[in-house]
Amino acid sequence: MPKFLKRLVVAVVIGLALFALNMAMSKQGLFGVGIDYYKVDLIKMAGINIILAVSLNLINGFTGQFSIGHVGFMAVGAYSSAYLTVYCTQGLEEKLASMMGANAAAIIVFVLVILAGALAAAIAGLLVGIPTLRLRGDYLAIATLGFAEIIRILITNINKVGAATGFRGCVDSVTGVTCPDASMGRLTIPAYTNFMWIGTFAVITIVVIYNIVKSDTGRALISIREDELAAQAMGVNTTRFKVTAFVISAAFAGIAGALYGHWRLPHPADFTFVRSFEIIIMIVLGGMGSITGSILGAVVITILPEYLRSNPYEVVLLLTLIPIVAILLRVVGRDRLPKALRAGLGYYAFVLVAYALLFVIARLVLINVLSLDIQLQRVIGDISNYRLVIYSALLIGMMLTRPQGVFGGREFGFSWLKRAQRRPEGDEPSGATAGVSIAERDDPTSDPGKDLENR
Amino acid sequence: MDTFVQQLINGLNVGAIYALIALGYTMVYGILRLINFAHGDIYMVGAFAGYGLAYFIAAKLGLAGPSWAGLLIVLVGAMIVAALVGMAVERFAYRPVRKYSRMTTLITAIGVSLLIENLFVARYGGQGRGFPQLLQDDTYRLFGNAAISKSQILIFVVSIALMLLLQWIIYKTKVGTAMRAVSFNLNSAKLMGINTNLIITFTFALGSALAAAAGVLTAQYSPTIDPLMGITTGLKAFVAAVLGGIGNIPGAVLGGLLIGVAETMVVGYGANVGIASTYRDAVAFAILILVLLLRPSGLLGSTVQEKV
């Protein structure tokens, strides 16, 4: 099949999948299958986090510049786009609506507003990037943090966007009270953002960042990460490439912000540096310099706290079992397994089944027999209060045991499935682990940050 | 003039607190090149430890109400508790990741910070609680309308005493010499027979104790404490350390005082030049960015030549 046809098919499939998901999330549902409101919110948040994480990975993972101010650009995107929606686009939308109907008009206006938000964030990225990217390592990290905080405090002081109370709609700039009527602007920010928008932009972000990384620009960025001085010596204009990466990354954060701003009303408290940390945790968890890793990290970090709320014991058990299973497999050794389970798909199936079995047994013993949950509840009270404690403990545990993240610098693909089947028996190194065996298969590359440190 | 003196006193007061916390940041950075994001939370732990101790001595020792003995017990006790927490954090979180990249250690620090905050929120709730009064507070008129309260004097006296003590430890004792050696070059210090792990743990204990003192003093002066009180204060103290030149001990004190004064001056006089007092929190960050752009090594820091 020619390449472009293959790509077309992939694009159509992704588009249809997004559309089907969107249908399932709507009130009618897809063929009677619906997703409840609470889960819809989580999926939408995961989509926005994917945009943020993948775009931040371009800077932190691929270029090796440690920025912890990503949320500042998200705030710029959210507020500038919401500002335009509230104060500037009402007339345009009405005019377009009379020409082509209300739906099409809203779509056109929203696209324009999102692009404007991206542009504003990109300009902010340029302004922040040019002076700060001269700094290295920790200093760059702190400077970006400082800029993000300043952006947030500035927003908190602008009456026209609702100041500290959050931006809900038209506000009188002098008195800071809500407009009495719609003559000055819209009274509420319309909730344009549905899953289709978030999904589409998440796919666009992934494709664009992936292509940048694979292009010669991406090679230049990676060379900066590996050794900035050497890259410079090879004729790479490091400052220009760093600023370019920073601006692109900021623009996508702006898109994420614009989507967020037209879904949940933007509020300064949503854009504190804690949120930046969260995005960093996502890319670190998945693996710096791995796009699929960032996607995984974004999804897991969005959903994990919610699952910790409803099933705290199961989540903790599932995660603690990963190293235990890995050790058990190493102890048993692959040679002692029956032939069918020694390699390929059989092995993966064996690991999964063993893992699931252990989980069921451990859960039965700990909760049903020893009733650990009730005893724990007696000591510390409701465990769901502790979900963020567990979450941060998991982060520290991850850093202690696997600092390069789940995928390291590699990408997750399905090629390992084919390879696994072709591979002759006994060829594989023993002791691959349950959760991470895919990643460990390839040659280990060094932790991207390590080279910076050694200099 | 009166208002100026008043603002200056308040500013130096806030600044002394920032300085005490900044010392911990700067010492740890000097030795490990690690931004200890959890340091602000150690300050909070100190305040909470003081809170617990104050109630403990009121119930068990009958030291309810303001008294000097109670204040001393609470202050020293909180410092000891925080020092232990700081040592535990170093031993169980930072030491295992020390061999990894700086990115990893930084994220571990963020994780520890989140862990401490969330643990306290889960255990004690997110809302603020009143700190018991340990000092019969009086206000002294200086001249004109400028006044200083007993708590403020306490902050000055205790922080100056602690800084002098720190100066003495670092420059006059054997441990201090070892600390300086480790911060100069960790590997060479190790080759000279210094137990670097012990020195690093000691540094964390020292910095945490200072932060705890700051926590108790702040809680005594403005008597509400909450589990998230360390976030902003910690960040500003860190900015103070950068302003003075990170890794430089007198620099941390100078930076802390400057940031404190700058902040209160913006609150006091900013309105005259069109800066609302709500920009108070932005001052530290604006200073931070100016410093990083104009003189990244800080006011008192020396520029480090980069080796290729």
Image: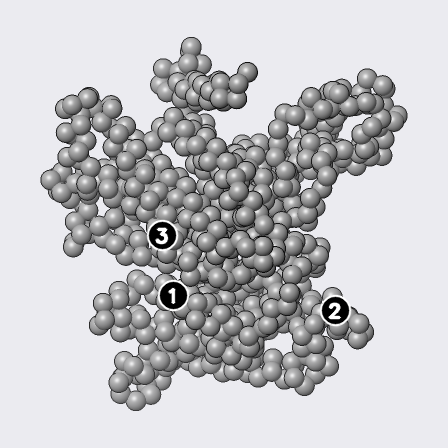
Residue placed under numbered mark 3 in the picture: A124
Frontmost residue, A44 versus B208: A44
Residue placed under numbered mark 2 in the picture: B187
Rendered position, A35 above or below B199: above
- Hey, what amino acid is under mark 1? Ala
Q: Where is residue A175 in the image (x, y as percent from the top left)?
A: 16, 54
Circles 1 and 2 in contact, beta carbons < 8 Å:
no
Residue lying farthest right? A336
Q: Which chain carries label 3?
A: A
Reading the chain from its start, which is encountered first: label 1 or label 2? 2
Q: Which chain carries label 1?
A: B
Element marked by disc 1: helix
Residue placed under numbered mark 1 in the picture: B286
Element marked by disc 2: helix
Q: How far separated are the C-alphas under marks 1 and 2?
A: 36 Å
Q: Position of residue A435 (x, y in %)?
A: 68, 33
Which residue is drawn at the image coordinates 26% and 64% (left, top)?
A: B276
Q: How far separated are the C-alphas under marks 3 and 2?
A: 42 Å
Q: Which chain carries label 2?
A: B
| Front label number (1 vs 3) | 3
Frontmost residue, A311 versus A405: A405
Co-location on one chain, circles 1 and 2: yes
